[in-house]
Image (cartoon, helix red, strand yellow):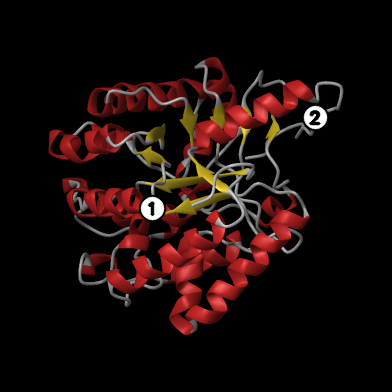
């Protein structure tokens, strides 16, 4: 992989565990915290090591609080990867929390993530892209370097509708989750990183979507397209990367554990798109996606992306940065 003179593209993985998917989906049995971390973490680390790639793993604090997961989680930082905070309880209605509750949610997650991995996170991504001005304010107060919770696409409501159709949620539970994957207006958010107004030096690094069209390009979506035609899915991604280069967007690409797992690994999550594909097929597709990305960008963890943004802003301090004036819940 070429890295010299290439712009940075950040790569991250939301380490959502089996129980967190079941909880959001309304499935019984999540309270016992069933886990596949001992399967997927070694698989992902081997995959990344073979390609000499370092990324950011956003870890759920509840997983870090359980001793049974410590070996898997510690192996992430032992391999030289960054860890971020993905909340403690992984509730996509984090934007409904009070400021006191957000502080507690982040603090307890930080404590357990540091205990399990040896590193205290300085980056955050909300579960289900849940975000609010309260969350941003608490992140600033707690000294976070960056947030990565925005997902600029118009398709969030469609994704949420599909999720609800396959779920066993009550109307009350759906109401709590009505912000899952964001609202239509999320599509109007910028793709390039920026600072939040009145939030100090907190940088927002959006999950990249296709420039102009704001269609998803995260790997789970590409795998879904690949079920119908792997060739079309890869052409779609190449087109998106070409638009990123044209619009000077340095991508921040998102992975999930299920990108590396098939129905043979966890049949309980068969309701997810592309879970009818075997893991070896999905991993082969992920490899091709990252190869395309690495042809044009130097793949790096989120913190490297944030540092590069700060350095660029320092050089261009005379240029007025882009702000969002407020966050609406």
Question: How far is the residue under mark 1 from the one under mark 2?
Answer: 35 Å
Can you tell which quarter of the image residue 101 is in? top left
Q: Label 2 crowding class (10 Å Cα cut-off): few <14, some 14-19, many 20+?
A: few
The crowd level at tag 1 (other Cα within 10 Å; few <14, some 14-19, many 20+) is few
Against 83, residue 215 (above or below) is below
Q: Determine whether 122 is above or below 213 in the image.
A: above
Task: Please identify, in this view, whether the residue under mark 1 or under mark 2 is nearer the observer.
Answer: 1
Residue located 55% across and 24% down the image: 145
* Residue furthest left as drawn: 68
Please provide percent x and percent y for residue 238: 62, 67
Q: Position of residue 48 (x, y in %)?
A: 35, 50
In the displayed structure, would residue 47 be above or below residue 286? above
Could you tell me which secondary element the residue under label 1 belongs to? Answer: loop
Provide the secondary structure element on which disc 2 rests.
loop
Q: Which residue is mark 2?
A: 321
Residue at horizontal 40 percent and vertical 43 percent from the top: 91
Asked whether 191 or 298 is in front, the reply is 298
Residue at x-position 70% and y-position 49%: 249
Residue 272 or residue 313, whichever sits in front: 313
Please identify the quadrant where the C terminus is shown.
top right
Task: Determine which residue is flagged by label 1.
Answer: 51
Query: Is residue 187 rendered to the left or right of residue 98?
Result: right
Q: Quadrant of residue 60?
A: top left
The answer to whether residue 131 is visible is yes
Residue 295, image x and y in percent?
Answer: 57, 57
Give the mark nearest the N terminus, 1 or 2: 1
């Amino acid at each position: 992989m070429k890295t010299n003179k290439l712009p940075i593209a950040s790569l991250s993985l939301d380490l959502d565990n089996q129980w967190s998917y079941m909880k959001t989906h309304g499935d019984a049995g999540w309270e016992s915290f069933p886990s596949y971390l001992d399967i997927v973490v070694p698989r992902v680390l081997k995959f990344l090591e073979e390609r000499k790639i370092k990324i950011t793993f956003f870890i759920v604090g509840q997983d870090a609080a359980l001793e049974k997961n410590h070996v898997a989680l510690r192996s992430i930082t032992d391999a030289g990867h960054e860890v971020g905070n993905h909340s403690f309880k992984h509730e996509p209605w984090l934007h409904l929390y009070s400021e006191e509750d957000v502080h507690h949610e982040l603090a307890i997650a930080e404590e357990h993530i540091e205990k399990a991995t040896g590193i205290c996170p300085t980056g955050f991504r909300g579960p289900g892209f849940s975000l609010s001005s309260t969350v941003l304010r608490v992140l600033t107060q707690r000294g976070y370097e960056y947030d990565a919770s925005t997902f600029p696409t118009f398709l969030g409501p469609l994704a949420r509708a599909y999720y609800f159709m396959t779920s066993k949620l009550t109307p009350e539970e759906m109401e709590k989750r009505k912000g899952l994957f964001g609202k239509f207006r999320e599509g109007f958010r910028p793709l390039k990183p920026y600072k939040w107004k009145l939030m100090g030096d907190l940088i927002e690094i959006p999950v990249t979507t296709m420039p102009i069209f704001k269609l998803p390009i995260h790997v789970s979506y590409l795998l879904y397209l690949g079920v119908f035609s792997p060739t079309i899915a890869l052409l779609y991604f190449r087109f998106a990367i070409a638009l990123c280069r044209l619009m000077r967007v340095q991508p921040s690409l998102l992975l999930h554990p299920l990108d590396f797992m098939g129905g043979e690994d966890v049949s309980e999550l068969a309701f997810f798109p592309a879970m009818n594909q075997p893991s070896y097929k999905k991993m082969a597709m992920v490899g091709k996606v990252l190869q395309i990305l690495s042809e044009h960008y130097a793949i790096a963890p989120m913190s490297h992306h944030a540092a590069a943004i700060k350095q660029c802003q320092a050089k261009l301090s005379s240029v007025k940065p882009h702000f969002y004036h407020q966050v609406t819940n």
